[in-house]
Image (cartoon, rainbow, N blue to C red):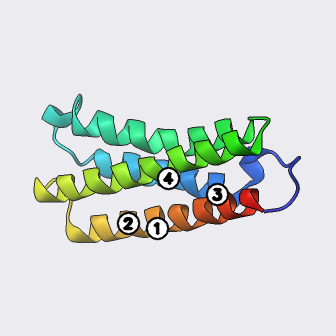
């Protein structure tokens, strides 16, 4: 991943997480109005937490703290994934929407794990 002095917004892991937020916002606009304060709000908060925790982790002084925030971001990805399956179950999205979102989530998971591995070296 390179130089420790890089800004968080230069990191591919953060850029991909930021893209995921856009994917989730676009998709959650399809949810019914009655989900505004339930699933829509929940999935958006989870999506926002991914790049936010990456950024916060980068801002931490110690590597162990950075790694912990990467784990929190990764956990949020699993939360989003589950919420997407629930949205599919409720017919708020179609399989293609789920597949597209899972592809972006998988990309984020791989980059976060790669960054964790880098930090552990």
Camera-side mark, 3 or 4? 4
The residue located at (64%, 51%) in the rendering is 14
Q: CA distance from mark 3 to mark 4?
A: 11 Å
Residue corresponding to mark 2: 102
Q: Residues within 10 Å of mark 2 (few under 14, many from 20)?
A: some
Asked if residue 22 can be seen in this view, the reply is no
Q: CA distance from mark 1 to mark 4?
A: 10 Å
In the figure, residue 3 lies in which quadrant?
Answer: bottom right
Q: Is residue 70 above or below residue 107?
A: above
**Element type where label 3 sits in the image:** helix
Residue corresponding to mark 1: 106
Q: CA distance from mark 2 to mark 3?
A: 16 Å
**Element type where label 1 sits in the image:** helix
Q: Residues within 10 Å of mark 4 (few under 14, many from 20)?
A: many
**Element type where label 2 sits in the image:** helix
Residues marked 2 and 4 touching at CB (< 8 Å) = no
Among numbered discs 3 and 4, the one appearing first in the sequence = 3
Residue corresponding to mark 3: 13
Camera-side mark, 2 or 4? 4
How far from the left and from the top, in percent, is residue 112?
60, 59
The residue located at (57%, 44%) in the rendering is 51
In the figure, residue 36 lies in which quadrant?
Answer: top left
Q: Nearer the viewer, residue 1 or 17?
A: 1
The residue located at (33%, 57%) in the rendering is 81
How far from the left and from the top, in percent, is residue 30?
24, 49
The residue located at (16%, 41%) in the rendering is 32
Residue corresponding to mark 4: 74
Q: Is residue 31 above or below residue 104?
A: above
Q: Residues within 10 Å of mark 3 (few under 14, many from 20)?
A: many
Asked if residue 108 can be seen in this view, the reply is yes
Among numbered discs 1 and 4, the one appearing first in the sequence = 4
Camera-side mark, 1 or 4? 4
């Amino acid at each position: 991943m390179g130089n420790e002095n890089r800004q968080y917004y230069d990191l591919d892991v953060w850029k991909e997480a930021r893209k995921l937020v856009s994917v989730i916002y676009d998709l959650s606009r399809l949810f019914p109005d009655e989900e505004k304060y339930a699933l829509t709000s929940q999935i958006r908060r989870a999506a926002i937490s991914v790049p936010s925790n990456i950024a916060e982790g980068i801002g931490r002084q110690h590597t162990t703290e950075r790694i912990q925030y990467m784990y929190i971001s990764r956990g949020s990805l699993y939360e989003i994934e589950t919420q997407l399956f629930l949205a599919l179950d409720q017919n708020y999205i179609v399989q293609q929407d789920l597949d597209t979102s899972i592809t972006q989530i998988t990309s984020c998971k791989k980059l976060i794990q790669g960054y964790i591995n880098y930090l552990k070296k």
